[in-house]
Image (tube, rainbow, N blue to C red):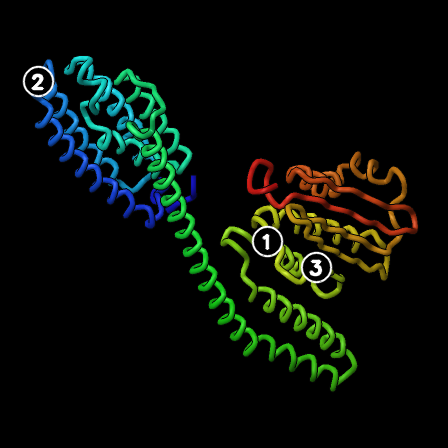
């Protein structure tokens, strides 16, 4: 199923599918008129004409109730009328044997007519797609053949099965295409609005904050002395902010996704070297946030334990359904057994903040270190949860 609109916690079909449902109910009305006309023509051939009129009246009442029920917007509220519609169609077709003799029902349509029985196929196809439509068409065809007592494959004299299957396939494909097109249109609209808003914010930041930072950097360098450090810091923040704005101008594929490059840039700043792809690394925002927390912890450990003057480097790789983040420093490294000792002392930065987070994401965290050789973490995580997306 597709993800539609939600209202009050209920999933709604996209607006693009609603005209198809309305058209299906118009078709239902036309089939009812045809079925009543067929009843008028055939009633004299029935062995129980009164019962046949009762059944046709019941069919008409149900058709009206089904049309009203299927006009509602939520997919859940449409599920039970579609299922009931199928049951009613089967029951009406089987009831043909109660009102007609063998000579009639073996050579004529069933009581509710094949055209009216098509409503169950159409509804199933719109609700669940082409596969459900094809299955419903096959089942209705089998019921019709069983009621009539004919199972020959002469499509020249009876093309009911291929027609019903074709209807289910065509309507299902049309409904899925409408849903997919509607989602793509909504996504494009959201991305266009988000991009326009980012550009507006970028202009405001450029006109205000960036100009101030550039002025502080220039004047600090001119004055010299203690203000040179302030100028250097202002210059670093100016560079970081410009990079952030430029990356934010590239939209990701969905409002629930985030660009992992941008999030890691906020964690690394300008004092840590970050190497990342030139295109957005899009993944669910919550998973990107957890990866950023792992990087934050690793960089904090570098600042605290790698030694004075140690530099840190972060490498981000996008491998289709997997992201690999490498955090390396050129510090003093970790002595053998030091991590186990720290964990025994209740210092759980590595075991919980790094390995625990990565394991919760279904990924792996590999540590490579030796005294005097620095520390390197390789974090390998799927972009999506197992069983979701393409991971």
Q: Residue at x 60, y 80 (%)?
A: 211
Task: Count neighbours of disc 3 (C-alpha within 10 A) and say few if under 14, some if 14 to 19, many if 20 or more.
Answer: some
Against 195, residue 50 (above or below) is above
Instruction: Please report contact status of discs 1 and 3: CB closer than 8 Å, yes or no.
Output: no
Residue 289 horizontal side relative to residue 154, left or right: right
Task: Count neighbours of disc 1 (C-alpha within 10 A) and say few if under 14, some if 14 to 19, many if 20 or more.
Answer: many
| Badge 3 element | loop
The label nearer to you, 2 versus 1, is 2
Could you say where residue 384 lies in the image, as x and y percent from the top left? 59, 43
Q: Answer with mark 1 or mark 3, whichever residue precedes in sequence.
A: 3
- Is residue 284 at least partly visible in the picture? yes
Against 98, residue 211 (above or below) is below
Could you say where residue 61 lies in the image, as x and y percent from the top left? 14, 29
Could you say where residue 314 lies in the image, as x and y percent from the top left? 75, 56
Instruction: Please report contact status of discs 3 and 2: CB closer than 8 Å, yes or no.
Output: no
Against 219, residue 115 (above or below) is above
Residue 146 horizontal side relative to residue 200, left or right: left
Could you say where residue 126 lies in the image, as x and y percent from the top left? 34, 39
Q: Residue at x 60, y 65 (%)?
A: 247
Figure quadrant of residue 26 = top left
Residue closest to the eye, 180 or 228: 180
- Residue on which the image places disc 3: 276
- Residue on which the image places disc 2: 49
| Badge 2 element | helix
- Is residue 9 at least partly visible in the picture? no
Residue closest to the eye, 249 or 202: 249
Q: Tally the marks.
A: 3
Residue 181 horizontal side relative to residue 383, left or right: left
- Residue on which the image places disc 1: 282
Q: Answer with mark 2 or mark 1, whichever residue precedes in sequence.
A: 2
Task: Count neighbours of disc 2 (C-alpha within 10 A) and say few if under 14, some if 14 to 19, many if 20 or more.
Answer: some
Measured Cα–Cα span from mark 2 to mark 1: 67 Å
């Amino acid at each position: 199923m597709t993800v539609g609109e939600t209202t009050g916690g209920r999933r709604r079909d996209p607006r693009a599918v609603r005209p198809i449902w309305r058209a299906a109910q118009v078709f239902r009305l036309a089939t009812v008129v045809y079925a009543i006309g067929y009843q008028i023509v055939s009633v004299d051939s029935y062995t129980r004409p009164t019962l046949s009129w009762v059944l046709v009246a019941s069919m008409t009442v149900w058709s009206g109730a089904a049309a009203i029920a299927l006009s509602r917007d939520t997919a859940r509220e449409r599920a039970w009328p579609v299922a009931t519609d199928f049951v009613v169609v089967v029951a009406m077709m089987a009831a043909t044997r109660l009102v007609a003799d063998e000579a009639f029902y073996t050579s004529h349509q069933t009581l509710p007519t094949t055209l009216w029985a098509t409503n169950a196929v159409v509804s199933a196809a719109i609700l669940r797609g082409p596969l459900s439509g094809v299955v419903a068409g096959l089942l209705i065809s089998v019921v019709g053949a069983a009621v009539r007592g004919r199972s020959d494959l002469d499509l020249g004299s009876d093309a009911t099965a291929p027609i019903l299957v074709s209807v289910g396939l065509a309507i299902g494909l049309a409904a899925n295409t409408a849903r997919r097109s509607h989602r793509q249109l909504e996504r494009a609209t959201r991305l266009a609005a988000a991009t326009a808003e980012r550009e507006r914010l970028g202009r405001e930041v450029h006109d205000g904050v960036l100009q101030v930072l550039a002025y502080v950097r220039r004047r600090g360098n001119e004055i010299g002395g203690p203000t040179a450090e302030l100028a250097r810091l202002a210059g670093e923040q100016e560079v970081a902010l410009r990079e952030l704005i430029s990356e934010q101008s590239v939209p990701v594929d969905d409002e629930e996704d985030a660009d992992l490059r941008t999030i890691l840039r906020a964690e690394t700043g300008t004092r840590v070297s970050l190497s990342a792809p030139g295109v957005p690394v899009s993944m669910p925002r919550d998973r990107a946030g957890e990866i950023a927390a792992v990087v934050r912890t690793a960089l904090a450990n570098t600042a605290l334990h790698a030694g004075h003057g140690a530099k840190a480097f972060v490498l981000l790789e996008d491998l289709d359904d997997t992201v690999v983040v490498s955090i390396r420093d050129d510090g003093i490294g970790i002595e053998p057994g030091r991590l186990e000792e720290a964990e025994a002392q209740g210092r759980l930065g590595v075991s919980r903040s790094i390995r625990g987070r990565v394991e919760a994401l279904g990924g792996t965290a590999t540590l490579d270190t030796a005294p005097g050789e620095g520390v390197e973490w390789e974090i390998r995580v799927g972009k999506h949860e197992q069983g979701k997306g393409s991971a």
